[in-house]
């Protein structure tokens, strides 16, 4: 089957410039199963209210896209419903913005039930903001009480209510799954097991590193958002230390807010972790920008206060050597590794082991307070030891 041909549009707004925006957009498009066939760069001091890039650029865009026989035009920025509709009418081609593109990729990649529910919720939240004057059929009215005319309810109101009902159902289901995940997390904390969560920019090599550390077989590929569903596995660090490591969804510049909200329960693994391994693509020319983007998302989900170790991955593509970089007080700050070849993984385990040792010193495992039912059982056992069985049963029955 022939891939859909996509014409790409990269827009620089104001003074914020992303050096890899065109390359990243091309990777996103390929991840969605599209074939990039052309690129238009545009620069604006501020977005045009009607076309975002202005009417002149839209005319140029239409000519280039039709010359290259493009089937769809993909923008590297989020567009309003009106801007998207105006551009589609002007160039007579369907338009995807960055938000819709990422949502499509997430929909295709989600495998677990929780992941599919989260993506559906994010899609409906995005759609609900685009009902107003989005399509002409939404202006039709339906008559009430079986009448063919008279006062009725507009199609847009019916659609909005149906979306609202479905979103409530999805949130309820996700809350139940979140409670199950919270129960599992509490059982791990009671067992005094250190929780380590891998975070980072998408395609930094988190899943490959996760598989190396845990000997798991999670899906890993050289593409954006290869992993959406959180996976947790026990990870051997040393003969004295074993931790629970979890692989999470990758972050990206301009990650739609709907997705961050929908994936809150999954990202809770990150919020409640004892240690974050912030995986960075050491071979990327914009790695510092990517680190900043990940830190921004961590701040948004309230995980910016969790201790973290930077893991510079893919050193096999650079001249860097495996090493541990330390803070002035000696604590591990960063580790240079290659998940592909295994270089430096012994140093990473050493760094995690050092953190785990200090963590146990700072967080001694104190006995928890007994539950009420446990106190009652203990009281009965003491009474049973003091009395004979017959007297104890009589007193128990009277109580």
Image (spheres, rainbow, N blue to C red):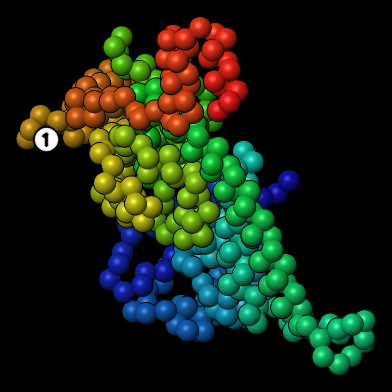
Q: Mark 1 points at which residue?
A: 327
Which residue is more in the foreground, 3 or 214? 214
Q: Where is residue 28 in the image (x, y as percent from the top left)?
A: 51, 51
Q: In which quarter of the image is the C terminus?
A: top right
Spot occupied by residue 346 in the image (x, y as percentages of width and height): 27, 17
Residue visible at 35% across and 18% down in the picture: 242
Closer to us: 123 or 24: 123
| Residue at x 45%, y 15% (from the top left corner) | 383
Query: Which residue lies at the image location 18% right of the left edge and 35% below the top edge?
Result: 333
User: Dividing the picture into quarters, in which one does residue 73 lie?
Assistant: bottom right
Tell me the SS state at disc 1: loop
Q: Does the rendering let one see residue 19? A: yes
Residue furthest to the bottom: 150
- The relative height of residue 200 versus residue 141 in the rendered view (above or below) is above
Which residue is nearer to you in this view: 113 or 176? 176
Residue 366 position, x and y percent, is: 28, 25
Q: Could you tell whether 251 is left or right of 86 in the image?
A: left
């Amino acid at each position: 089957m022939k891939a859909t041909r996509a014409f790409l549009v990269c827009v620089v707004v104001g003074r914020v410039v992303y050096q890899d925006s065109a390359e990243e957009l091309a990777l996103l498009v390929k991840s969605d199963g599209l074939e990039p066939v052309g690129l238009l760069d545009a620069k604006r001091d501020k977005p045009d209210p009607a076309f975002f890039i202005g009417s002149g650029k839209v005319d140029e865009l239409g000519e280039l896209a039709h010359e290259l026989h493009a089937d769809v035009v993909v923008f590297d920025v989020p567009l309003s419903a009106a801007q998207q509709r105006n551009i589609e009418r002007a160039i007579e081609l369907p338009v995807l913005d960055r938000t819709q593109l990422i949502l499509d990729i997430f929909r295709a990649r989600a495998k677990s039930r929780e992941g599919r529910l989260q993506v559906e919720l994010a899609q409906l939240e995005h759609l609900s903001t685009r009902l107003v004057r989005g399509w002409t059929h939404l202006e039709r009215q339906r008559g009430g009480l079986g009448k063919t005319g008279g006062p009725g309810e507009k199609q847009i109101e019916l659609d909005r209510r149906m979306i609202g009902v479905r979103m409530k159902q999805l949130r309820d289901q996700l809350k139940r799954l979140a409670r199950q995940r919270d129960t599992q997390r509490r059982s791990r904390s009671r067992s005094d097991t250190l929780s380590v969560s891998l975070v980072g920019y998408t395609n930094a090599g988190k899943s490959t590193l996760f598989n190396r550390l845990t000997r798991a077989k999670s899906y890993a590929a050289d593409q954006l958002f290869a992993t959406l569903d959180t996976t947790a596995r026990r990870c051997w660090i040393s003969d004295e230390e074993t931790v629970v490591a979890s692989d999470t969804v990758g972050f990206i510049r301009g990650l739609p807010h709907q997705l961050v909200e929908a994936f809150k329960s999954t990202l809770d693994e990150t919020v409640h972790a004892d240690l974050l391994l912030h995986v960075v693509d050491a071979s990327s020319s914009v790695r510092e920008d990517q680190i900043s983007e990940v830190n921004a998302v961590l701040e948004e989900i309230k995980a910016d206060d969790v201790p973290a170790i930077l893991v510079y991955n893919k050193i096999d593509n650079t001249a860097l050597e495996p090493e541990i970089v330390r803070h002035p007080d000696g604590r591990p700050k960063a580790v240079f590794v290659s998940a592909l070849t295994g270089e430096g993984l012994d140093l990473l385990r050493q760094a995690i082991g050092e953190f785990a040792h200090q963590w146990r010193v700072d967080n001694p495992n104190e006995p928890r307070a007994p539950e009420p039912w446990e106190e009652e059982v203990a009281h009965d056992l003491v009474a049973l030891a003091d009395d004979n069985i017959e007297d104890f049963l009589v007193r128990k029955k009277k109580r």
